[in-house]
Image: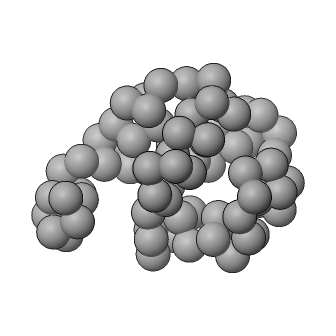
Amino acid sequence: MNFSKQLKKYRELNGYSQEILAEKIYVTRQRISKWKNDKTYPDIHNLIVLSVLFEITLDKLVKGDVATMKKNGQQ
């Protein structure tokens, strides 16, 4: 499972729209949309904020995405 699917899963489990999630973590709705569409990845600060907000580990939030990041040369 990649990050965008995890983001959608936990966003919906918590009942957040993209706009509400963006407000909660102080980013734009467009940034959430880019994450959702695999156009960009959040920085470590935003990953930590998301993991705290969703009450899950960072590993759970990004699990399965490491291989994609290596493939794309982002790690």
**Position of 38 compared to 69: left or right?**
right
What residue do we see at 53% from left, 64% from top? 35
Residue 28's quadrant in the figure?
bottom right
User: Residue 30 appears at what percent x and percent y?
Assistant: 69, 76
Q: Is residue 45 left or right of residue 11?
A: left
Residue 30 vertical position relative to residue 10 in the rendered view, above or below: below
Q: Residue furthest front?
A: 45
- Quadrant where the C terminus is found in the figure: bottom left
Compare residues 1 and 28 and report the one nearer the observer.
28
Q: Which x, y percent locates residue 13?
A: 72, 33
Q: Is residue 27 above or below residue 24?
A: below
Please indicate, yes or no, whether residue 9 appears anywhere in the rendered image.
no
| Residue 22 drawn above or below residue 55 | below
- Quarter assignment of residue 60: top left
Q: Percent x, y for residue 33?
A: 64, 70
The structure residue drawn at horizontal position 14% and vertical position 64%, both measured from the top left corner, is: 71
Q: Residue at x 83, y 39 (%)?
A: 15
